Amino acid sequence: MVVAIVGILASLLMPSLQKARIVSIQAVCINNLKQQAIALEMYVGDYNDILPPHMNTSGPYTGPYRPDQLAVYMNGTLENSKEVFECPSVTNHHKLGDYSDNHFHVFPTKTVDAPGMTMGSYTRPSELMSHVDSEDHTTGKGAWWVPCPVTHSGLNVQASGRHGGKTSVLFLDSHVESMKHSNVLGNKDDLWGHFTR
Ligand SMILES: [Zn+2]
Ligand SMILES: [Zn+2]
């Protein structure tokens, strides 16, 4: 009898405990994005408002990459700032982290030979996505860049709904929201800046 009641109580508690666990893990993720936002603000402060390039090279993928450039404003190097770039819901981290910048519409590809966009050039920073939880479906790993889903929905790498169907999104004005994954993929309110900036 007691065992049965405990069993029933446990089954009643389980969903709310699971939900609490998702929320507490998500809080770490959101805090990670906030720290990236602070680093981003410091970076543009040092570079005449110009956003860090997706990768700072004009040749092949040699880096330094955007996470490397933000880590300068954290613990100096990406290696020493690793946990800020690792979403706690990911077990198989990408070496450059599990968060992507909005590479197609906000962050320039390379700025060694092409000057990047300035932060101030975006007219709706509170609605435009800066960084997002991302993953590679084929490897199960986190991902450090995603394409805009409007034109490239079929690629392996996409924004991830790994927090119980929610996605952590950093906006260009440095606020972070937990959004429905389908809204992120659906470019709700032109989140990605595909139609307007
Ligand atoms: Zn996350
Ligand atoms: Zn697009």
Image (spheres, rainbow, N blue to C red):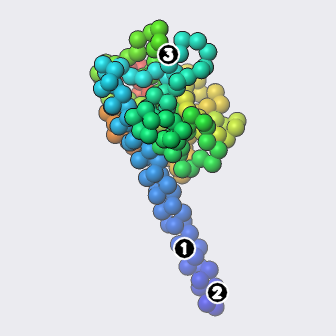
Give the residue number, with chain letter if any, for mark 1: 12
Question: How far apart are the alpha carbons under marks 1 and 3?
Answer: 52 Å
Compared with 2, 35 (above or below) is above
Question: How far apart are the alpha carbons under marks 1 and 2?
Answer: 14 Å
Question: How far apart are the alpha carbons under marks 2 and 3?
Answer: 63 Å
Residue type indicated by callout 2: Val
Residue type indicated by callout 1: Leu
The local secondary structure at tag 1 comes to helix
What residue lies at 51% left-to-right and 45% top-to-bottom? 83
Instruction: Please indicate whether residue 32 sits to the left or right of residue 144 in the image.
Output: left
What residue lies at 60% left-to-right and 36% top-to-bottom? 95
What residue lies at 64% left-to-right and 85% top-to-bottom? 4
Check disc 1: other Cα within 10 Å, few if <14, some if 14-19, many if 20+: few
Label located before the other in sequence (1 or 2): 2
Check disc 3: other Cα within 10 Å, few if <14, some if 14-19, many if 20+: many
* Image coords of residue 128 (percent x, y): 38, 29
The local secondary structure at tag 3 comes to loop
Seen as rendered, the residue at the extreme right is 138
Seen as rendered, the residue at the extreme bottom is 1
Give the residue number, with chain letter if any, for mark 3: 110
Give the residue number, with chain letter if any, for mark 2: 3
* Image coords of residue 147 (percent x, y): 55, 25
Residue 144, numbered circle = none
Label located before the other in sequence (1 or 3): 1
Assign the N terminus to one quadrant of the image: bottom right
Label located before the other in sequence (2 or 3): 2
Instruction: Please indicate whether residue 90 sits to the left or right of residue 177 in the image.
Output: right
Q: From the Cβ of disc 3, is ligand 2 less than 8 Å away? A: no
Q: From the Cβ of disc 1, is ligand 1 less than 8 Å away? A: no
Residue type indicated by callout 3: Lys
Quarter occupied by residue 155: top right
